[in-house]
Amino acid sequence: MGAIKTIGCLLVIGFLSGCVSIADINVSTNKIEKTWLLDYQKTEEALRTRVIDAPSLETFTQVKKALVSIDLPVTKSSLEDGEVWAQGIAPAPLSQQEWEGVAEKESPRVKELSGGLLYLKDDPSDYVLTVKITLRAIDRKTLVVIDYLLSAPKFEAYGINMPKVAPPEAVLIGSAKFWDALERKLQLVDIPKPRRANPDELGA
């Protein structure tokens, strides 16, 4: 149990007495994850998808460049499968200052949901962010979809289920940074900026 006293991921244990177990911690982290997931799903369509008015080959190239530009190195990619995977250490793609703002805003809710057991810390670097970008050709356009997953291997080894969903404010900032980075890369090759998909394109 000694390692639990120094949990340092996204969440930190604010007080740990002898009667607090890993099961107690997991109840709190599960509650936090479900709350964040619900918030994300309310704005998912606006954050997650865009259409690029260009063929998938050119879009594929610029997506990879955009990820690298926001400190998310590409780990694997397949044009045939229409997938680009990237992985980085939190708080990337957020800056440290941006993350501290998220922590300040979200910590009160985290404390409330956990009964005072947990709070957000200023250094989330024990977290690994995995991003999957899916590209789907629609005629001469490309639908681009973001998915992501957080993991904390160091603490998962102790049976602690840290949230796999990021705080909503972090998702908002991170998504905006990716789309802005992609827009800049597309402009360099004279491709229109990413735009919101219409219902027909989402169902294509």
Image (tube, rainbow, N blue to C red):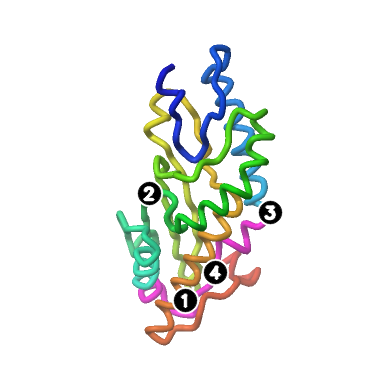
Q: Is residue 29 above or below residue 45?
A: above
What's the residue at 63%, 38% (across, down)? Answer: 110
Say if mark 4 contacts mark 1, CB within 8 Å: no
Q: Which residues are magenta?
A: 42-59
Residue hosting label 1? 183
Residue hosting label 3? 42
Residue 85 inside the magenta-drawn segment: no
Quadrant holding the C terminus: bottom right
For badge 3, the amino acid type reads Lys
Categorize mark 1 by other alpha carbons within 10 Å: few (<14), some (14-19), many (20+).
many
* Camera-nearest residue between 70 and 44: 70
Residue hosting label 4? 50
Residue hosting label 2? 89
Categorize mark 2 by other alpha carbons within 10 Å: few (<14), some (14-19), many (20+).
some
Give me the C-alpha separation between circle 4 and circle 1: 11 Å
**N-term mark: 2 or 4:** 4
What's the residue at 61%, 29% (across, down)? Answer: 28
Say if mark 2 contacts mark 4, CB within 8 Å: no
**N-term mark: 3 or 1:** 3
Q: Is residue 29 above or below residue 64?
A: above
Give me the C-alpha separation between circle 2 and circle 3: 26 Å
For badge 2, the amino acid type reads Ile
Q: Position of residue 98 (x, y in %)?
A: 51, 57
**N-term mark: 4 or 1:** 4
**N-term mark: 2 or 3:** 3
